[in-house]
Amino acid sequence: MADSDNGYKILSDNRQARHQYEILEVWEAGIELRGTEVKSVRAGKANLRDGFAQLKDSEIWLHNVHVSPHSTTIQQYNHEPLRPRKLLLHKGEIRKLIGKVEQKGLTLVPLKIYVVRGWIKVTLALAKGKKLHDKRDALKRKQEKREVERALKSGY
């Protein structure tokens, strides 16, 4: 899971997002964390399942991402698990996102949290929600592709 050449390690992954949303564009953003949050995220105690990002006052905030409190820290010094966290992007990137998010039906979804050369980063996707029939079509295509690969592998 980790590549020792560039220090890349995935800490948390939102697998459900690719099923529920059609991913249009992807950005890498830094995330503003407190001390105990950093320890918990590095231990893999972050959950992105219901997470989303929201624009507020030309800043991007990550909501509904659960980071478990650190186990060996006193409760009064620990962080709040579901607090909004600020995402760190360049102003030009934020301006582009503001224009695209204001289009009908687009949202910002976190795909994964990972470490690159010691820095914790978030992959943020501009996404459009899939309808039920789109999800069924995607599953059908995936299953057909598997069957073709099995037939080719078995030596048909």
Image (cartoon, helix red, strand yellow):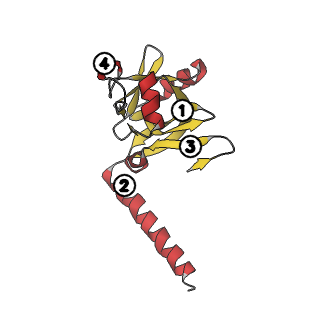
User: Is residue 78 or residue 66 the one in the foreground?
Assistant: 78
Q: Residue at x 33, y 38 (%)?
A: 50
Pointer 4: what residue?
76
For label 2, the SS is: helix
Of marks 4 and 3, the one in the foreground: 4
Pointer 1: what residue?
121
Pointer 2: what residue?
135
Q: Quadrant of the C terminus?
A: bottom right
Q: Amino acid at mark 2?
A: Lys
Q: Amino acid at mark 1?
A: Lys
- Determine the residue located farthest toward the right in the rendered image: 5
Marks 4/2 in contact by CB < 8 Å: the verdict is no
User: Is residue 124 or residue 23 the one in the foreground?
Assistant: 124
Q: Amino acid at mark 4?
A: Gln
For label 1, the SS is: strand
Which badge, 4 or 2, is on the more N-terminal residue? Answer: 4
Could you say where residue 107 lies in the image, as x and y percent from the top left? 41, 33
Q: Is residue 43 left or right of residue 63?
A: right
Q: Is residue 86 left or right of residue 2?
A: left
- Placement of 76 over or under 135, stated as above or below: above
Q: Amino acid at mark 3?
A: Lys
Of marks 1 and 2, the one in the foreground: 1
Q: Residue 51, located in which quarter of the rendered image?
A: top left
For label 3, the SS is: strand
